[in-house]
Image (cartoon, grey):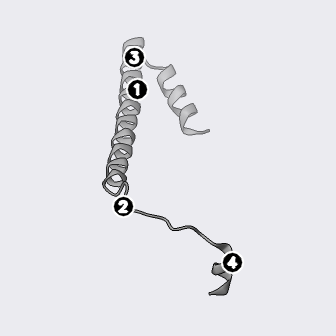
Amino acid sequence: MNIAERIYETVKTLPEKTATEVLDFAEGLKAKQAEGESIRKENALAVLAKYRGRFTAGKFNREECYDR
């Protein structure tokens, strides 16, 4: 039995009001996790933005690569 099934079996026996609280709690955790992921993504993009335009790539010549 996986964790979702265990939660379902447990909540099934609870009164409706208590089951609603469990659902609200689970949805709150899900929202918090999504918010954390978006913050990490924004921070990573901010770090990359600091270095935008600083890299200049020269033309790559495959034959010169083999000569080295």
Q: CA distance from mark 4 to mark 3?
A: 67 Å
* Residue type, mark 3 in image: Thr
| Rendered-image quadrant of the N terminus | top right
Instruction: Return the disc, 4 or 3, that comes first in the chain's sequence.
Output: 3
Mark 3 sits on what residue? 20
Mark 2 sits on what residue? 54
Residue 4 in picture, x, y percent from top left = 55, 33
Mark 1 sits on what residue? 27
Q: Is residue 44 above or below residue 18?
A: below
Q: CA distance from mark 3 to mark 1?
A: 10 Å
Secondary structure beneath label 2: loop
Mark 4 sits on what residue? 63
Q: Are the residues at dot 2 and dot 4 in contact (C-beta closer than 8 Å)? A: no
Q: Are the residues at dot 4 and dot 3 in contact (C-beta closer than 8 Å)? A: no
Quarter of the rendering containing residue 24: top left
Secondary structure beneath label 3: helix
Instruction: Return the disc, 3 or 1, that comes first in the chain's sequence.
Output: 3
Of labels 2 and 4, the one closer to you: 4
| Rendered-image quadrant of the C terminus | bottom right
Q: Is residue 28 above or below residue 54?
A: above
Q: Are the residues at dot 3 and dot 1 in contact (C-beta closer than 8 Å)? A: no
Instruction: Return the disc, 1 or 4, that comes first in the chain's sequence.
Output: 1
Q: Are the residues at dot 1 and dot 4 in contact (C-beta closer than 8 Å)? A: no
